[in-house]
Image: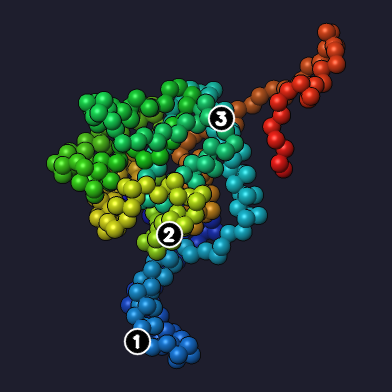
Amino acid sequence: MMTAQPQTAADKPNGTAAPKAKPIKKAVGKAAKAAKTTGKLTGKAPGKVVRKAITKAPRKAADKVIGKHEKLSRKVYEKELTKLQVKLCHLQEWVKASGARVIIVLEGRDTAGKSGFIRVLKERVSPRVFRVVALGSPGDDKRQKLFLQRYVEQFPVAGEIVIFDRSWYNRAGVERVMGYTPEKQVKQFLEQVPKFETWLTEAGIILIKLWLEIGKDEQERRFRARVHDPLRQWKLSPMDVKSYSKWYDYSRARDEMLAATDHAAAPWFVLPSDDKKRARLNGTRHILSRIPYHPIKHETVELPKRGNKHRYDDGLDLASVKLVDQHY
């Protein structure tokens, strides 16, 4: 389905080949055997425990392919993130100096972690260089435009990086699943978008496409957190609630979209995002690896001496101004 080549032994950090996944049948057998023992120890019905274990067994086998890791400590995460954010600052200076134009497309299901990923990308850089585009549903005036026109209007100028928090791929995802776009138009989009993206890259735009892949159980956990957490409730839109029940419809739409629009000029890369910290680190590192930037050397800035001309007592008279209440 994907054009990206499989990772070889030379690609692995320690020079070893990627581990092979155990057959699902073997994983299920081991899980069921362990579950019987667990059932006897806990007093639960063995059959029920076995069924639960068998359901989870394929997922555990798949985890070994992707690489199931221990929880990343905040200390390690922040240390690695700081290193990457320094490189993002180098990238920013290179983009400004070279006049490069970069588009980063972030797609994925609801709760996949796009907003958090964007936050760490933008945290230490200038919003004048890193610009986020998150278009809402088109109004009546926008409906009169060509479908791609509203996205093209947001494309970067020279010396700018634009991050699309969802993009023209809405047509192959939410619009298709929710029935907002006729199937004929979706098929036309899937056929034509590789040509459109090839034209972009030939025009000199660096186009990076990432699909953030979240598991079914983790998505449900995050959805339920949004229901009860007042700091996250704003993320739970009526559209999210409607689409929650259509997991497999979105899966089929994802599969067809990746197969039809993965091409040499703009390949798709899948970013596992059940673990938010690792997703942010791996995603940032990947973006940096796709852009041929290098640090720009600047002369060390020397601050000039402050003059004393027109000197006066410039302390603010706090009794004559309105102060913000000091509660903290």
Label 1 vs 2, first from the N-terminus: 1
Residue at 51% across, 28% down: 129
Dot 1 crowding, Cα within 10 Å, few <14, some 14–19, many 20+: few
* Image depth: mark 1 or mark 3 in front: 1
Labels in figure, total? 3
What type is the residue that disc 3 sits on? Ser
Label 1 vs 3, first from the N-terminus: 1
Percent x, y of residue 223? 41, 56
Between the C-alphas of marks 1 and 3, the distance is 57 Å
* Image depth: mark 1 or mark 2 in front: 2
Query: Under tag 3, what secondary structure?
Result: loop
Residue, disc 1: 47
Q: Is residue 179 left or right of residue 41?
A: left
Residue at 26% across, 25% down: 141
Residue, disc 3: 126
Seen from the viewer's position, the closer of residues 227 and 56 is 227
Label 3 vs 2, first from the N-terminus: 3
Look at the numbered discs 3 and 2 and tell me whether their residues touch, using CB distance below 8 Å.
Answer: no
Percent x, y of residue 36? 41, 88
Between the C-alphas of marks 1 and 2, the distance is 29 Å
What type is the residue that disc 1 sits on? Gly
Q: Is residue 25 left or right of residue 102?
A: left
Which quadrant of the figure contains the C terminus? top right
Residue, disc 2: 224
Seen from the viewer's position, the closer of residues 129 and 306 is 306
What type is the residue that disc 2 sits on? Arg
Query: Under tag 2, what secondary structure?
Result: helix
